Amino acid sequence: MENNQYINRELSWLQFNARVLQEAADKTVPLIERLRFLGIFSNNLDEFFKVRYATIKRIDLAGKGGKSVLGGIKANKLLEEITQIVIDQQSESLNILASIQSKLKEHNIFIINEKQVPK
């Protein structure tokens, strides 16, 4: 790594959240714990978009580019990279959720939404 290159904190954060997702995918982890890891992944991502993504978006809209502030990458390029990573992670999380729901169903445990609750 050259001296002028840094690991971007937003991309590093997404790598961390990918590790949380790996825990949710780990079939050696108990099902309910896997479901909790998915919840943590989702909450982390919500917070990321509310704070970090929004800040980068403001930098981009202000036309400042933010290359020096953003670890050597322009704001618009960083937004594109983040978007692609998140799309991939979300797809993986949905696959993991489907797998967990299938396993829970084998134990007669179902995840329902508010519209499925009897009145």
Image (tube, grey):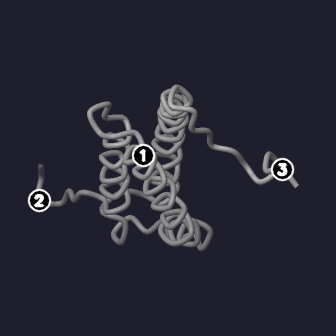
- Give the spatial CA distance, label 1 vs label 3: 24 Å
**Residue 6 position within the rendered picture, expressed as x and y whole percent measured from the top left:** 22, 59
**Residue 85 position within the rendered picture, expressed as x and y whole percent measured from the top left:** 45, 42
Instruction: Decide if residue 88 is on the left or right side of residue 69.
Output: right
- Give the spatial CA distance, label 2 vs label 1: 44 Å
Question: Which of the two discs, 3 and 2, labels the residue nearer the N terminus?
Answer: 2
Question: Which of the two discs, 2 and 1, labels the residue nearer the N terminus?
Answer: 2
Question: Which of the two discs, 1 and 3, labels the residue nearer the N terminus?
Answer: 1
Mark 3 sits on what residue? 118
Query: Between residues 56 and 64, which one lies in front from this camera angle?
Result: 56
Q: Quadrant of residue 119?
A: bottom right
Q: Say the numbered circle drawn on residue 3.
A: 2
Instruction: Decide if residue 38 is on the left or right side of residue 58.
Output: left
In this rendering, which labeled residue sits more in front, label 3 or label 2?
3
Instruction: Establish if 91 lies above or below 42.
Output: above
**Residue at 33%, 40% in the rendered image:** 30
Outermost residue to the right:
119
- Give the spatial CA distance, label 3 vs label 2: 61 Å
Q: Residues within 10 Å of mark 1 (few under 14, many from 20)?
A: few
Instruction: Decide if residue 39 is on the left or right side of residue 108.
Output: left
**Residue 42 position within the rendered picture, expressed as x and y whole percent measured from the top left:** 51, 54
Mark 1 sits on what residue? 32
**Residue at 12%, 52% in the rendered image:** 2
The type of residue carrying mark 3 is: Pro
The type of residue carrying mark 1 is: Ile
